[in-house]
Amino acid sequence: MPGEAELPDLPPAEQGFDRGEVTAPIHRHNDRSMTQPDSSAKQRSGRALPALLGLTLILVLGGGYLHHRYLDQRIDAMQTVFDSLIEEVHSTGDAVHLMRMERGSEGLGIHAVVKRIRFWAPQLQYSSTLSAEVPRLNEILDECNRAVAAIGPDAFPVIEAAITENVDEDEVRKALLKASYFADPRLSEQLMERMLRGSHYSPSPRLRFIASDELMKVNRALAGQALADILKSEAALGVDRRLNPQDPDAKFLNPMGVKPFPQFFNFIARFASSGYEDKEGVLLMILGRPNHDINTYREVIRELAKLKSQDAVKRIKELYKRPPGLEIRPLFKVDCLQALADIQGREAEPFFQEALLNATHQSVITKLKDLIKQNQ
């Protein structure tokens, strides 16, 4: 309109305001309360998530542990049932073995088993080690042992009587000796000990060694004591109970006489492996006696060398200079020299130097030179 001043152009928002339109006021500043969550709420949310995860982990692990325990208990229960079934199967198998033996023998119970042992045990003696028959023969004798176990202690008197009767059959007596342990372990150990000592059952030297080995498997302490008593009172020349007069054992009241026992030296290594408490003392006692043969001295010297027994040095030197018997015994001298080297080390060199001056056998000379060279 003429005469009216022209208004300047305004932004749409301001125009609208001017036209009377109601518009919300525009806030130019940044209002954090409207655009972002409160910081304390954010912190609570941050703590809640790990707690939730931890609780979930605890529940998972706890459930797994309980499940594992449940499975363990179930497995243990199943194993118990399984073991009882296996035991029942074995018992049934033993009874079946016994019935088979009874059908094949003119006897019942343990008498049928003993008859079967008497028949099959000697077959091992005539079979070579690599023979295909040996495993089967051992299997048959194992079946006999299981049958004896099924009978129990009532079988022991019959087995002992059979051992007494079959004096000249070592293989049969050996099998019966093993079977006796399945009947009554305690009485069987006593039987083995008496046979080892030689005071009962008239055992051959071989059977005494067998008794020693079997007793060592089940009672090393008892075997060690018996072997110690044997070494105190016996020798390759025979048995002299006077060597152990303080022994009150009734088993020694029945001497074996003065029958030579050239296999006596086989007791030494067995005794050394028995774990007897005063092993060195017993071996030194044997070494100091004049009534043993060269094989016994050799075995004793070797065992004392393993023990590095300083108390044996003097006697070993004496035996080197004067071996048992009238022969030079070069191999025995070599054993003595090696034992001295094992026990004394460099300290034995003066003796080696002196021995080299008087040595006459080539094997002894060579051994002395080697030992002296080792100490240089």
Image: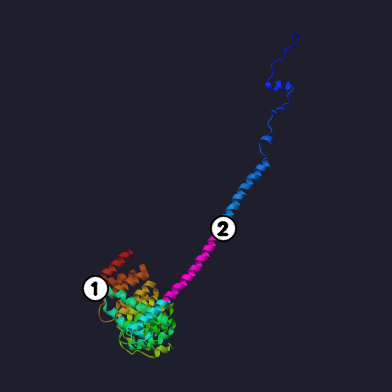
Quadrant in the rendering for residue 136: bottom left
Camera sees residue 292: no
Quadrant in the rendering for residue 300: bottom left
Camera sees residue 356: yes
How many dots with numbers? Answer: 2
SS at mark 1 in the image: loop
Q: Position of residue 177 (x, y in %)?
A: 37, 82
Residue sitting nearer the eye, 119 or 200: 119
Q: Position of residue 36 (x, y in %)?
A: 66, 37
Residue at mark 1: 361
Q: Which residues are magenta?
A: 64-90
Measured in 3D between alpha carbons, the distance from the residue under mark 1 to the one under mark 2, in whole angstroms, is 83 Å
Q: Position of residue 274 (x, y in %)?
A: 40, 76
Looking at the image, is mark 1 or mark 2 nearer the viewer? Answer: 2
Residue sitting nearer the eye, 336 or 127: 127
Residue at mark 2: 63
* Magenta stretch encompasses residue 86: yes
Task: Please name the amino acid that badge 2 sits on.
Answer: Gly
SS at mark 2 in the image: helix
Q: Position of residue 246 (x, y in %)?
A: 43, 88
